[in-house]
Image: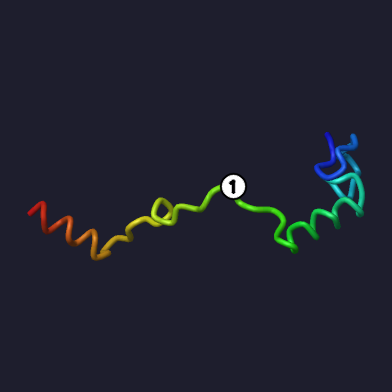
Amino acid sequence: MRCPICKKQTVAEGNLFRPFCSERCRLIDLDNWLSERYRISRPVEVESQVRALPGDATDEGAKGERD
């Protein structure tokens, strides 16, 4: 496998820093996260993540329409 930072070939077995090749690359990746250099490519759609809970007002309204 390749290190995601420097692209150097590295082995997973016995590597304390995997998936990175070294502590240096691991710390570079951590800095990228902390400096907010990594971004989500598109906004998260909250509505698709939220599900109606049993007894929710939207459930009761739907039941009332069916009755």
7 relative to 25, above or below: above
42 lies left or right of 67:
right
Q: x, y (%) of residue 37?
A: 72, 56
29 relative to 14, above or below: below
Which element type, helix, strand or loop, lies under badge 1? Answer: loop
Name the image quarter holding the N terminus. Answer: top right
- Residue nearer the viewer, 7 or 12: 7
- Specify the farthest residue to the left: 67
Q: x, y (%) of residue 54?
A: 29, 60
Location of residue 6 (image quadrant): top right
Residue at horizontal 80 percent and vertical 60 percent from the top: 31
Residue occupied by mark 1: 41
Residue at horizontal 51 percent and vertical 52 percent from the top: 43
Q: x, y (%) of residue 49?
A: 43, 53
- Label count reads 1
User: Label 1 neighbourhood size at 10 Å, few (<14), some (14-19), many (20+)?
Assistant: few
- Residue nearer the viewer, 42 or 1: 42
Residue at horizontal 89 percent and vertical 50 percent from the top: 16
60 lies left or right of 26:
left
Snapshot colouring = rainbow
Name the image quarter holding the C terminus. Answer: bottom left
Give the amino acid type for the residue marked by disc 1 in the picture. Ser
Location of residue 46 (image quadrant): bottom left
Q: x, y (%) of residue 14?
A: 91, 43
